[in-house]
Amino acid sequence: MTDKTASLRDRVAHWIRPEIRALSAYHVPDAEGLIKLDAMENPYGWPEDLVEEWRLRLRRVSLNRYPDPAARRLLPVLREAMGVPAGAALLLGNGSDELILILMLAMAGEGRCVLSVEPGFVMFRMIATFTGLDYVGVPLRDDFALDTEATLAAIDRHQPALVFLACPNNPTGNVFDREAVAAILERAPGLVILDEAYHAFTDHTWMPDLPSHANLLVMRTVSKMGLAGLRLGLLAGAPDWIAELDKIRLPYNINVLTQETARLALERHEILDAQTRRIREDRRILFNGLRQFPELTVYPSEANFILFRVPPGRADAIFDGLKAQGILIKNLSHAGEALRDCLRVTVGSEEENERFLTALQKIL
């Protein structure tokens, strides 16, 4: 090691916060040449007539101009497509991740914390670290249901500024009991954010309940609906909250191509709705297919993925065996004790699901 290299590393160690240096960057595996069933993406594209209309619209977009910072042509379409109640305000983000960051930056302060459940969405913990907030993770029950008593006790003890609940939950796929969530809303001193990233695959939602709870915000994304490449998230809630959060949003955060593409897609939402219905049916078939393997414990899901537990100590071998056959899923076995021996598969197309099940059968 040269003196120059040593000096650079010393500078990095001195100036970068130790909690950041202790983190690992969010890893996205290379899926080139593989059937990609690891990232909860919609496997279906657009029909050719919609693609052609999209091309025509994009030709009219002025790339030399900044986007409308308020996304005024997109917001009404989003409100209708997402069923946002009258009187609720909207904040748009570059994916849900930016909205989580905005929320935590706005609420950060000495001695304040974020509370969520474990296992849950990993970005809640990571972004809490980025923003200097303490993170409190409350373990779910063995069946991944909310432990209501433990959660309420943690709220009483830590008085979190923010409570995040993903519903359906990622990576478990289940929906939390409404009475339990209502109790959390009643007890929480700060904001409660229901992350409904997988709203398209369940009939359960808290969006209509926004007017009834002053401390409730509902977060959604268009990614799982088939628009993952756009990176568009939304946060709905009382105007007083949204107005303050909007002060942190960086200007022009939703680019012109995203605004125009999302508007077109949601104006023709019947196409996305049909794909969603198909994914729901494919999920049912895939779930039943996985349950044919007696070695597996398969967890019910109301998202576009299914979590399953394999025989002890075999998760890595099964994951590698599937990858060797050209199929990439998510290995969660090293993501904490509750997920030991667990793998997660995205619901793909009918052909992709069949190839996955056939490959899995060969390994088991």
Image (cartoon, grey):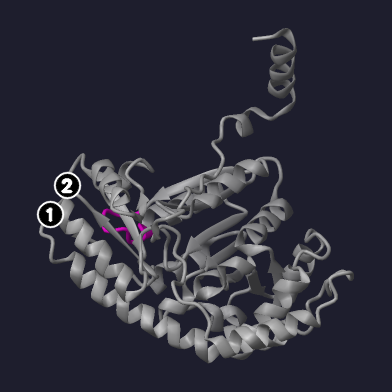
Q: CA distance from mark 2 to mark 1?
A: 6 Å
Q: Quadrant of residue 252?
A: bottom right
- Magenta residue span: 140-148
The residue that appears at 63% across and 73% down in the rendered structure is 214
Question: Residue 240 appears at what percent x and percent y?
Answer: 76, 72
Question: Residue 153 appears at what percent x and percent y?
Answer: 44, 51
The residue that appears at 30% across and 52% down in the rendered structure is 343
Residue 259 visible in rendering: yes
Task: Specify the label residue 295 is tagged with.
Answer: 1
Q: Quadrant of residue 346?
A: bottom left
Do the CB atoms of the residues marked 2 and 1 lie less than 8 Å apart?
A: yes
Give the secondary structure at mark 2. Answer: loop
Quarter holding the N terminus is: top right
309 vs 242, left or right, is left
Number of numbered tags placed on the structure image:
2
Question: Residue 284 appears at what percent x and percent y?
Answer: 27, 76
202 vs 196, left or right, is left
Which amino acid type corresponds to the residue marked 1 in the rendered image? Glu
Residue 85 visible in rendering: no
The residue that appears at 62% across and 82% down in the rendered structure is 211
Determine whether 21 is above or below 286 in the image: above
Task: Specify the label residue 94 is tagged with.
Answer: none
Residue identified by numbered label 2 = 311
